Image (cartoon, rainbow, N blue to C red):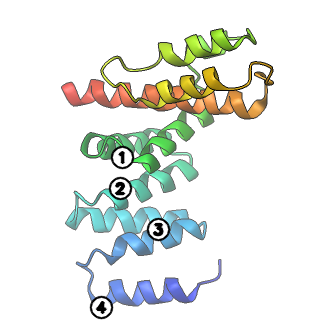
């Protein structure tokens, strides 16, 4: 891979001050360039000095996802969500792990009815009762208020529902581990 001017500047910055938090920007740049091993190594080294740096941990998790280290990525991303439960990048990365593993909640796997009411029931069944504006509730409202004649079997809608259910599953996993 070819080095970008930004990458070179970040490397110089981290080399000048190895204890700085610039390591996170360097790791993210590596990740964006597809240099996942470098991103992982940079994050792990920096997180030894700055273990609470959330964006660096998200970058580590996302890089681990790209190299197929789903278990390690889940650990990192779940740690992020314990500190910042609304971190969208971590939620998306966990949803991506579930998607790549082919893990779909049972309610979604057996789901074949095209009626909007069924889709709303599937979406709201996954909603957390304690969260009045959860992602699943918002999705259910969007589906409920959409045109009844819409194509409810569209791949985009199915993928969106899968994503929302994976997010809900990830939040429940995080809540489960946070209680321990």
Secondary structure of the residue carrying tag 2 is helix
- Going by the image, does 107 lie left or right of 173? right
Q: Is residue 51 above or below residue 25?
A: above
- For disc 2, the neighbor class at 10 Å (few under 14, some 14 to 19, many from 20) is many
Q: Nearer the viewer, residue 2 or 83?
A: 83
Q: Nearer the viewer, residue 136 or 36?
A: 136
Residue at image point 73% right, 8% down: 113
Q: Which mark is residue 57?
A: 2
- Going by the image, does 148 lie left or right of 168? right
- Cα–Cα span, label 2 and label 4: 22 Å
Q: Is residue 94 above or below residue 60?
A: above
- For disc 3, the neighbor class at 10 Å (few under 14, some 14 to 19, many from 20) is many
- Are circles 1 and 4 on residues that touch, CB within 8 Å? no
Secondary structure of the residue carrying tag 4 is helix
Kindly tell me whether residue 39 is visible in this rendering.
Answer: yes
Q: Nearer the viewer, residue 6 or 16?
A: 6
Q: Nearer the viewer, residue 43 or 176?
A: 176
Residue at image point 48% right, 12% down: 125
Residue at image point 38% right, 20% down: 128
Q: Which residue is mark 4?
A: 16
Q: Which mark is residue 76?
A: 1
- Cα–Cα span, label 2 and label 3: 10 Å
Q: Is residue 157 above or below residue 6?
A: above
Answer with mark 2 or mark 1, whichever residue precedes in sequence: 2
Q: Which residue is mark 3?
A: 28
């Amino acid at each position: 891979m070819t080095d970008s001017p930004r990458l070179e500047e970040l490397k110089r910055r981290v080399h000048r001050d190895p204890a700085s938090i610039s390591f996170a920007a360097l790791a993210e740049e590596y990740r964006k360039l597809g240099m996942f091993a470098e991103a992982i190594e940079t994050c792990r080294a920096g997180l030894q000095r700055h273990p609470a740096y959330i964006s660096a941990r998200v970058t580590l998790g996302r890089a681990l996802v790209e190299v197929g280290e789903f278990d390690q990525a889940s650990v990192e991303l779940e740690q992020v969500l314990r500190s910042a439960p609304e971190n969208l990048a971590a939620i998306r990365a966990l949803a991506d792990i579930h998607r790549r593993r082919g893990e779909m909640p049972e309610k979604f796997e057996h789901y074949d009815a095209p009626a909007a009411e069924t889709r709303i029931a599937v979406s709201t069944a996954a909603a957390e009762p304690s969260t009045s504006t959860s992602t699943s509730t918002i999705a259910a409202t969007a589906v409920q208020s959409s045109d009844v004649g819409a194509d409810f079997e569209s791949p985009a809608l199915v993928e969106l529902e899968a994503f929302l259910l994976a997010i809900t599953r990830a939040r429940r996993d995080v809540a489960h581990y946070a209680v321990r």
